[in-house]
Image: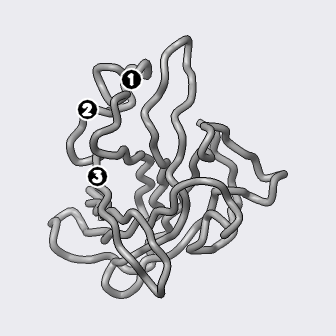
Amino acid sequence: PFYAQGAPFTTELATQDEPGERILISGTVYAKDCTTPLKDVVVDVWQADATGNYHDAGTAYRLRGQMTTNADGYYAFQSIRPGQYNVGGALRPAHIHFKFHYPGQELITQLYFKGDPYLSPNDPCIGCNSDEASLIIPLVSTTVDNESFMAGTFDVNLQAS
């Protein structure tokens, strides 16, 4: 949901003036053997803002972007921690959507943040997998180039690679 095709290639999804807690998400995309890193995987990312609102292509692809994995299968981007939003009177946990594009496969998934009180069983979205451990990441405080972030790692295995 809320996907807008054609987001720009960027590793800075949130501009410096975007309200919210700064986050740094990185990871490695692996082949189906779970050890071979895959290069040139397009990682398409979109998320809500700190208040839980999504923005479309008409808002200059705010909080949306694409990047390509390097020779080591690595990707990283900076953004802000997304807010929860209301669905039928209950809040969805904060999450970031991903679409991984690789020849012969497209994986659509999302990541969640450890400790979010709206993870399953409190998530009103049935089938969104907010109880799947591999989709829930911890965030830890870090500093990169004198900028503070909450950082997390989201590794992925592509099964059809």
Of mark 2 and mark 3, the one earlier in the sequence is 2
Q: Is residue 86 above or below residue 1?
A: above
139 and 34: which is toward the camera: 139
Colour mode of the rendering: one colour
User: In which quadrant will I find the C terminus?
Assistant: bottom left
Q: Label 3: state its secondary structure.
A: strand
Q: Say left or right for 67 vs 108.
A: right
- The residue where tag 3 is placed is 137
- The residue where tag 2 is placed is 131
- What kind of residue is marked 2? Asp
Verify CB contact (< 8 Å) between mark 1 and mark 2. yes
Disc 1 and disc 3: Cα gap in Å?
Answer: 16 Å
Question: Residue 57 in the image: x percent, y percent?
Answer: 78, 52
- Which quadrant would residue 76 be assigned to in this image? bottom left
> Residue at left 58%, top 53%?
20
Of mark 1 and mark 2, the one earlier in the sequence is 1
Q: Label 1: state its secondary structure.
A: loop
Verify CB contact (< 8 Å) between mark 2 and mark 3. no
- Which quadrant would residue 24 be assigned to in this image? bottom left
> Residue at left 34%, top 37%?
116
> Residue at left 54%, top 12%?
89
Q: Say left or right for 141 vs 148.
A: left
Question: Residue 16 in the image: x percent, y percent?
Answer: 66, 69
Eye-nearest disc, 2 or 3:
3
Q: Is residue 127 above or below residue 18?
A: above
- The residue where tag 1 is placed is 123
Q: Label 2: state its secondary structure.
A: loop
- What kind of residue is marked 1? Asp
Question: Residue 105 in the image: x percent, y percent?
Answer: 41, 57
Question: Residue 94 in the image: x percent, y percent?
Answer: 46, 40
28 and 59: which is toward the camera: 59
- What kind of residue is marked 3? Ile
